[in-house]
Amino acid sequence: MQLKRTKIVDIFDPLLVGEKVCVKGWVRTRRGNKHVQFVALNDGSTIKNIQIVIDLQKFDEEFLKPITTGASLHVDGTLVPSQGKGQSVEIQAEEIEIYGTADPEEYPLQKKGHTLEFLREKAHLRMRTNTFGAVFRIRHHLAFAIHKFFNERGFYYLHTPLITASDCEGAGDMFQVTTLNLGDLPKTEDGKTDYSQDFFGKTTSLTVSGQLEGELGATALGAIYTFGPTFRAENSNTPRHLAEFWMIEPEIAFYDINDNMDLAEDFIKFCVKYALEHCKDDLEFLNKMYDETLIERLHSVIKDKFVRLTYTEGIEILKAANKKFEFPVDWGTDLQSEHERYLVEEHFKRPVILTDYPREIKAFYMKQNEDGRTVRAMDVLFPQIGEIIGGSEREADYDKLIAEIERRGIPMKDMWWYLETRKFGTVPHSGFGLGFERLILFVTGMANIRDVIPFPRTPKNAEF
Ligand code: ATP
Ligand code: MN
């Protein structure tokens, strides 16, 4: 009779000791001597390997030869307490089936520690390493935590479109979507591209944010969140920017900026706590291998109340700082990552929520303050990362919003639907956007955003 497979994550159950078990997975390492061989097998369900003990009296050496790093196996045997150190139990192999081999001359993931840069070139295989297994298991748990957080609070998951005809959000440069033949574009009489012949009959792009549609949801369902891919054609080759990333955007009716800050703080703390509870082995591995202060940092973020201060106060602190910044600071300039990190890591030594930014450096839809020069924006700034969340209370006043749109010369012809949220039953409302990969960067302690998404899209790179 065929034994039922046990995932390796479940094999360390003391009740299984002495039982016949079946495991399947990929060989991480193999070592041993003339009498006995040890194979470390991993199936991706946990960072832990199970040790397979192969008695050479029971198995032919020729048969075992192709069992090298990367080969895939099915092993039946008895789970026994381990003699050696490093593992509590091991499997005495009784039957071995080799599914597939991995020629050591060709398989790139040999035992020796590879650099993250090398592994980025092997992104089709890097999930088989300890590091990327850990990162992508944590990514999964964080995604699950996000849905759990909002679901438990009565938010509805709203699917906003990826293809959009509005190009006024201004959050970043957009990727155009077209089915026109770029080598032979149809022209209008005045020589411009004739988009009426394009698939949608107008110019369309990939979305840079689901917020505007999210506001439609919030002013109907009360509280919604989006969680989906977002695209920005920004040519910024930084360790914190991707051309395709995932964003979470809650939007809530009857919320002011303070409610919004409370939500953002509770939300991030919930996610970090969830990861500490559900990803213990993976976090301990990353803590040991990459950053010995990681777990401590995660605990401190949960414990400390985030500092809240205005942009204007932040600028005062930066100007008084005894530090040379690469980019100068002055009221009215956008903060660079170095400024954000100074406030968080050196000045306050905890996360910071900066509010009331100058109107000119923020988006048109943010609620205008009485002073006429700032808006009710809020950015959440994190250690190692800088900006992790950007949000605001939204301008709910129809006339003020129209005036701001005209002042900025934003093309509004495709935006009539958005404005109707203010025309019909307008309400105070707020929301924010969290870059999912920035949260994963923080939780894993990875330094480069390319290492926390399975297949990164960055300028000049769309491999795999
Ligand atoms: P930044 O100044 O870092 O470019 P932004 O001001 O453009 O960010 P928003 O438009 O407010 O960011 O987007 C909301 C959130 O989305 C940001 O706080 C960040 O977490 C994330 N984000 C923005 N751009 C990117 C990107 N290119 N790659 C990954 N995450 C991003
Ligand atoms: Mn940006």
Image (cartoon, helix red, strand yellow):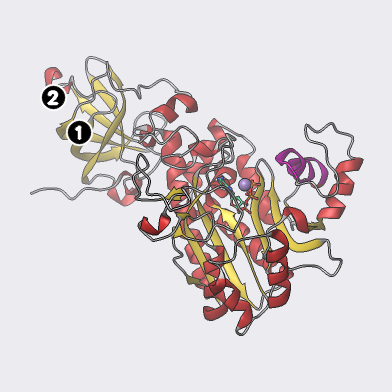
> Quarter holding the C terminus?
top left
Q: CA distance from mark 1 to mark 2?
A: 9 Å
Quadrant of residue 200 within the rendered picture: bottom left
Q: Which residues are magenta?
A: 335-347
Q: Residues within 10 Å of mark 2 (few under 14, many from 20)?
A: some
Can you name the residue that lies furthest to the bottom here?
A: 425
Please determine whether, in this image, residue 454 is positioned above or below residue 357.
Answer: above
Pointer 2 residue: 59
Number of the label disc, if any, that sits on residue 47: none
Q: Mark 2 and mark 1 in contact (Cβ < 8 Å)?
A: yes
Residue 78 left/right relative to 361: left
Q: For mark 2, give the secondary structure.
A: loop
How packed mark 1 is, by other alpha carbons closer than 10 Å (few <14, some 14-19, many 20 or more), is many
Q: Amino acid at mark 1?
A: Ala
**Magenta: main secondary structure:** helix
What's the amino acid at mark 2? Phe
Is 148 or 336 nearer to us in this picture?
336
Cβ of mark 1 under 8 A from ligand 1: no
Label 1 or label 2, whichever comes before in sequence order: 2
Question: In which image quadrant can residue 294 be found?
Answer: top right
**Is residue 316 visible to us here?**
yes
In the image, farthest residue toward the front: 189
Query: Is 425 located above or below residue 118 in the figure?
Result: below
Residue occupying image coordinates x 18% and y 50% = 4
Q: In the image, residue 232 lies at what x, y percent?
A: 53, 47
Q: In this picture, is 331 found above or below 53?
A: below
Dot 1 corresponds to which residue?
A: 93
Q: Is residue 38 magenta?
A: no
